[in-house]
Image: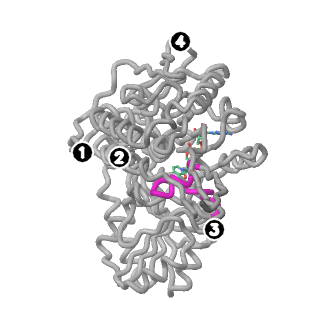
Amino acid sequence: MQHSTGPGPLKLPEKPRDYSALIDGRFVRAGERDVIERENPAHGTVVSRYPKATAEDLREALKAARRSFDSAVWSGLSAADRSRILLKVAALIDQHRVELREIECLEVGKPIGLVDREIGGTIAHWEYAATLARHSYGDTYDTFGNGALGLILRNPVGVVSMITPWNYPLLINSQKLPFALAVGCSAVVKPSELTSGSALRLGELLMEAGIPAGVVNIIAGTGLDLGDELCSAEEVDMISFTGSTAVGRKIGALAGERLKRVSLELGGKSAHIVCADADLDLAAEKVALGATRNAGQACVGGTRLVVERSIAEKFCEAVQTEISKLKVGDPLDLETTLGPLVSGLQKQRVEGYIADGERAGAQRWSLEADRAVSALPGHFVQPTVFTGVEPAMKIAQEEIFGPVLSVLTFDDFGEAVSIANSTSYGLAAGVWTNDLNTAIQFSRKLVAGSIEVNTFLAGVPELPIVGHRDSGVGHERGRFAIDEFTELKTVQLQTRPI
Ligand code: NAD
């Protein structure tokens, strides 16, 4: 598919945009319900209004999903037909990519010049899931002699509740929804109440592409209001959650109580291990990027630099030089490369961690305040690097979710592995070395679901996202997504010789 290109500049809209929820194929407009207002995190202006789902809306959405699944209106189509519709969704997202990147910029505060890559990634997920639709099949055992034939059928798991975070709204919904649809599931999607616009707009594109009414329902609301029912309702067969480890634990407990299948994609504290023999210019550029992309609000972001002691001082200077090239400012400006944090609460959290790092005795380096930034009322935090960090410090252990890099040093392979594996998380890691054996040995020893060697944040839909330890349970994307959203059934056929 030919993807269109080139972001243009963006102006703040004169009035907020009203979105509609999608329930059983019907659009419920913002004006028909109380609204959730979303402010642009740089300017503080209200840019979006979502209809706040009532308990009845949620019930209706769950029932519609159940009805659609039980009627086989979607799962009963041929995989080829489902695949064609998913490709149509991909094409519609591409057709509307300018609008979608503007929504993400206005609601999340992502720099408009950088957000296009995410929309491209989103399209790639829908396209890839379309290919998987035709590869969701079972197995046969014609190995029992003349007496029996065994069939293993693979069926969609059923109705999936999808609960997603604010940091990559459209992309994360697209790491779940197209894969569940590919194998024939129905869904109720609840995006973050902070950034629901792109998911709600996607609902309109799904209907346009021909997804039958009730198969996908998309509602806006808080986890507090809707979370328990989304996870416990009898209509639901599976919960697919991406978000914080704290909320993931609650959802895991509910799923356990109700014996529902659950997939949890949670937080991280990823390490970048930089060895002295690496291409240090490239490594410095990517380490700076890994710690600051999306203002550091990325689950896989490389927020710990674990660098060989012999090059540590010089390498940190190179990273600081790279960070100094960032243009912190208005996300609507094409030149900006680092925008604000998503909310005042998030800013407060991140500043709390920065103060904690200083109190613990780590040395702080921050980019100087920029005049253009201070003129805006938004939630800006300057990128910060802490050196002299000890593995036990809070800034080396906890997920900060802001543009803060903690630097630790190592003398040998064993020490590097031990530092990298010393947090409770296990989401991602980066390894920088030109020695193939070193790269392989690190890849074997690191406790992380995704390891990137001499690159970072290069995710593709073919490779699954997997959280080890407190980073989650289950996986998504990749061909293994078929396992995630299907259940097996065996049929043993008695045969007799003729
Ligand atoms: P969050 O856990 O606060 O919220 C995530 C979603 O859960 C939101 O839709 C929210 O409304 C809902 N929610 C909140 N409380 C709930 C409850 N009790 N029951 C049910 N739903 C509830 O996370 P966030 O602040 O939106 O996102 C940031 C977190 O997400 C970070 O920890 C980040 O690492 C993680 N994340 C992980 C991945 C991954 O793939 N592993 C990807 C992106 C973000």
* Left or right placement of residue 132 versus residue 192 in this view: left
Q: From mark 3 to mark 1, how far is it between C-alphas? A: 46 Å
Helix, strand or loop at mark 4: helix
* Crowd class of label 3 (few under 14; some 14 to 19; many from 20; radius 10 Å): few
- On the image, the x and y values in percent for residue 132 come to 42, 51
Q: Quadrant of residue 11?
A: top left
* Residue 372 versus residue 472 in the image, above or below: above
Q: Quick one: label 1 or label 2, which is nearer the N terminus?
A: 1
* Mark 4 CB near ligand 1 (8 Å cut): no
What secondary structure is marked by label 3?
A: loop
Left or right of residue 65, residue 101 in this image: left
In the rendered image, which residue does mark 1 sit on?
A: 1
Q: Is residue 231 left or right of residue 323?
A: right
Secondary structure under badge 2?
helix
Disc 4 designates what residue? 32
State the mark number for residue 144. 3
The boundaries of the magenta stretch are: 469-486
> Which quadrant is the N terminus positioned in?
top left
Is the distance from the Cβ of mark 3 to the nearest ligand 1 atom less than 8 Å? no
